Amino acid sequence: MQLKNMRSEAYSQLRYRIMHNKYTPGQKISEKVISDELGIGRTPVREAVIRVERDGLIDVVPQSGTYVSRIDMAMANNARFVRQILEVEIMLEATGKMTDEWYQKLQQNLENQVVVAQQGDPDAFFDLDEAFHKTFYLAADREVVWDWLQTLNMHLNRFRWMRLKVTNLDWQTLLDQHQAILDAVRRRELDDVRYSITKHLRLMLSERKYLLNKFPDYFMNVRPEDFTSADVPAHEPGTLDVRGILAKTTTKND
């Protein structure tokens, strides 16, 4: 049982480090380095590397070494398309099943997003972002669908994490869009729900050009149309306007 837990821990930590850019796309890694950094034995790490390779997150090149895979833009684009189609329906179902308990959990998540955004913590913000979306799947009783999407979403999620590291792609946009989604769900305005989540999930299309130009060596399978999205206007870093979300917090606590 202990070995099984170590295998699971090694896989989870290795996958997390790649997804969160602790190991960057194209970086050469080794079982020894991973084992030392994770504090886990070589055997569980070796098995974790095999599993992560199957996930498409690393490439083992004979007589060369093991490398973190580059972000596959074709897979990321397709994952975004599939998620947009599915998540609109999930959101509509969640709206019909939304209870005060689910709503309060989502609002608390948003408040936590504000805190970590002000702290400038991309890892915590990304995890809260994921939890925010997953909560709607849970409310709709579609957790299995969320689990299915995780393998498909890997390259999309790596792209999403990368955008948190670029000051020109501000977090305020994400906070505003998350609040707009939750407000539409709270009002049970289905057209607004559909519009808000679609706009949110299409954000990648307006930001990919910027990221591709910023980190050209991090991506593969890039198509000409990936560079046709409009430039994203710059924002001054550190100017989060969270008054709307904080006002809702104050109202809730009064």
Image (spheres, grey):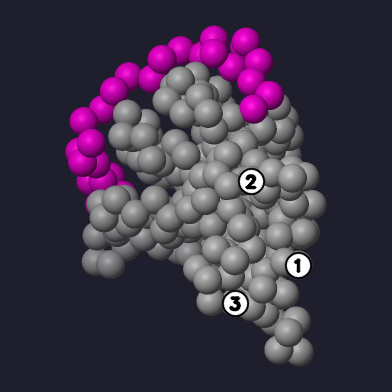
Viewer can see residue 114: no
Residue under label 3, please give it: 40
Amino acid under disc 3: Ile
Which residue is identified by label 2? 67
Are there few (<14), some (14-19), or many (20+) residues within 10 Å of tag 3? Answer: some
The span shown in magenta is: 220-248
- Pick whichever of labels 3 and 1 is earlier in the sequence: 3
Which badge, 1 or 2, is on the more N-terminal residue?
1
Give the class, few, some or many, for how many residues have Cα within 10 Å of label 1's Cα (few <14, many ≥20): some
Q: Which residue is mark 1?
A: 47
User: Is 205 placed left or right of 74 in the picture?
Assistant: left
What residue occupies the far bottom of the structure in this picture? 1
The reply to whether residue 74 is in sight is yes
Percent x, y of residue 35: 58, 70
How crowded pointer 2 is (Cα within 10 Å; few <14, some 14-19, many 20+) is rated as many
Residue 87 quadrant: top right
Q: Residue at x 71, y 74 (%)?
A: 44
Q: Is residue 34 above or below residue 240?
A: below
Q: Is residue 235 left or right of residue 65?
A: left
Q: Secondary structure at mark 3?
A: loop
Task: Residue at 21%, 31% (x, y): give it.
Answer: 236
